[in-house]
Amino acid sequence: MTLKQLEAFYWAATCSSFAMAAERVHLSVSSLSKRIAELEASLGQVLFDRAGHRAALTESGTRLLPLAGALLQQADRLQQDMGSTTGLRGPCRLGVGELTAITWLPRLVEALAAAHPALEVSVHVDVGAALAERLDKGELDVAVIAGPASRSALTSVPLAHARFAWCAGPGVAHGLHEMDAEAVQSYPLVTLPQGSGVTHLIDDWLRQADARPARRLMCNHWGAIVGLLAQGSGIGLLPEGWAQALHARDVLQVLPSPVPLGSLGYALHSRRDDLRPLVSMLHGLAAQHADFTVASGAF
């Protein structure tokens, strides 16, 4: 029995597929399966029931899983404690929303490169619901998502809050005194797609204002939303810092509202069963660098 065999078994048991597990340990699916077969031969136990459409853990595999996870965690800590000068190594898969991507993500990636140059960092940008699903399947190591974890397999640590403001192009804003129920009946609401944290914030505001938008114009890109608002396509939310900067340049107008907007709390999400030093390190670095007021070069 070797650590590499245990690693292959652990990720095959916790990822959504053998293909995803193989990607995490930089193996082909056949090589991953071979290591698991070698582990089964070494232990004299069948660890996966391969009869169905998807391999499932046997009773022996279920018993081994927490033990294998603990051994791999100890091995990671041993390597760390023995003073590796290059820090952590291997794949590091980050999931973020676009707001994080164009504010403080570059600082986080720079800090990761400085502290752990051997890490192979990759970033996946998507809405929060999609990120949570990928994290649950084992396709990501951590994800920055608005709000606390909503899946039982995930846990979250609060990071920072983002504040927003209602905006419209000068032509639309000229005909409005404030952002109220009448305004959303008169103009389309330009928003990110359902599943993003910002849509939850908008829905909360609509309930408090007793307002029902006549129409929503969905767009999955912040830069495109700015362009649509500037051209008079409707009313929308923007991060407060961006809204003020665009207001100062007369690109957009910030709209006052009698119903206050709440702030949106972001957290670092990870799997409950993932106790690797990589995850705890990412918790610390993300908490240090999370800042949604950072100026974006996009605007």
Image (cartoon, helix red, strand yellow):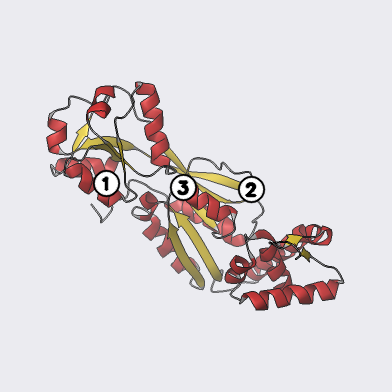
Q: Amino acid at mark 2?
A: Ala
Residue 226 seen in the figure = yes
Residue that appears at 22% across and 45% down: 228
Q: Is residue 25 left or right of residue 67?
A: left
SS for tag 3? helix
The Cα atoms of the two marked residues, 1 and 2, are separated by: 33 Å
Q: Amino acid at mark 1?
A: Ile
Residue 132: where, in percent of width, then height?
Answer: 53, 50
- Most foreground residue, 32 or 155: 32
Per the image, the residue denoted by label 2 is 153
- Closest to the camera, between mark 1 and mark 2, is 1
- Most foreground residue, 239 or 232: 232
- Residue 276 occupies quadrant: bottom right
Q: Is residue 127 left or right of residue 55?
A: left
SS for tag 1? helix
Q: Is residue 179 left or right of residue 7?
A: left
- Marks 3 and 2 close (CB-CB < 8 Å): no
* Of pointers 1 and 2, the one earlier in the residue sequence: 2
Residue that appears at 56% across and 43% down: 149
| Image height of 215 relative to 72, above or below | above
Residue 215: where, in percent of width, then height?
Answer: 29, 34
Per the image, the residue denoted by label 3 is 128
Residue that appears at 37% across and 28% down: 205
Residue that appears at 85% across and 68% down: 45
Mark 1 burial class by Cα count in 10 Å: few <14, some 14-19, many 20+:
many
Per the image, the residue denoted by label 1 is 225
* Of pointers 1 and 3, the one earlier in the residue sequence: 3
SS for tag 2? loop
| Image height of 253 relative to 205, above or below | below
